[in-house]
């Protein structure tokens, strides 16, 4: 509500600032407690020990995705791509397949537009 008393306005503003400051301090404390959990340090150690194995798996996955990308370029049917999409398990595979579907649909729209322009020009 509006008040005309300037002293009261100052008290209200200072109370609001104090509440905001307390809220910021609480947020900072919550972040600090999340950052310095002892569990994470042991998890990082595990990651260091498994790093060569995870890197090898990542390289295999990149190779599989490259092969899938080449396979997708050969497919010209949205229906086939949709079947592949439903069968795909990994996020990256689905991402590539959806991109191929979008590309095919864009090409179909472009072809239809060109055909319509040719038809209209006659």
Image (cartoon, grey):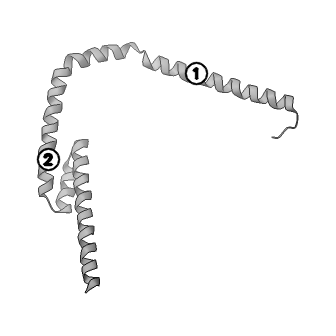
Which residue is at the far front?
Answer: 121
Which residue is at the far right?
Answer: 5
Say which quarter of the image contains residue 43.
top left
Q: Position of residue 102 (x, y in %)?
A: 27, 58
**Residue at left offset 55%, top offset 24%:** 27
Which residue is at the far bottom?
Answer: 122
Q: Position of residue 72 (x, y in %)?
A: 15, 53
**Residue at left offset 25%, top offset 83%:** 119
Mark 1 neighbour density, 10 Å: few (under 14) some (14–19) many (20 or more)? few
Q: Secondary structure at mark 1?
A: helix
Disc 2 or 1, which lies upstream in sequence? 1
In the image, 118: left or right of 52? right
**Residue at left offset 14%, top offset 55%:** 73
Q: Which mark is residue 121?
A: none
**Residue at left offset 13%, top offset 34%:** 60
Number of marks in the rendered image? 2
Q: Secondary structure at mark 2?
A: helix
Q: Position of residue 32 (x, y in %)?
A: 48, 18
Label 2 and label 1: CA atoms lie apart by: 49 Å
Q: Which residue is mark 2?
A: 68
Mark 2 neighbour density, 10 Å: few (under 14) some (14–19) many (20 or more)? some
Q: Which residue is mark 1?
A: 26
Q: Position of residue 21 (x, y in %)?
A: 64, 23
Say which quarter of the image contains residue 47.
top left
Which residue is nearer to you in this view: 121 or 76?
A: 121
């Amino acid at each position: 509500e509006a008040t005309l008393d300037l002293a009261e306005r100052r008290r209200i503003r200072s109370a609001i600032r104090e509440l905001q400051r307390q809220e910021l301090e609480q947020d900072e404390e919550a972040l600090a407690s999340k950052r310095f959990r002892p569990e994470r340090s042991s998890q990082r150690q595990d990651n260091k020990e498994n790093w060569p194995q995870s890197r090898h798996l990542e390289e295999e996955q990149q190779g599989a995705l490259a092969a899938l990308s080449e396979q997708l370029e050969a497919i010209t049917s949205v229906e086939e791509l949709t079947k592949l999409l439903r069968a795909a398990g990994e996020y990256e595979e689905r991402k590539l397949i959806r991109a191929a579907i979008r590309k095919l649909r864009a090409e179909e729209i472009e072809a239809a537009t060109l055909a319509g322009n040719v038809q209209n020009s006659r």
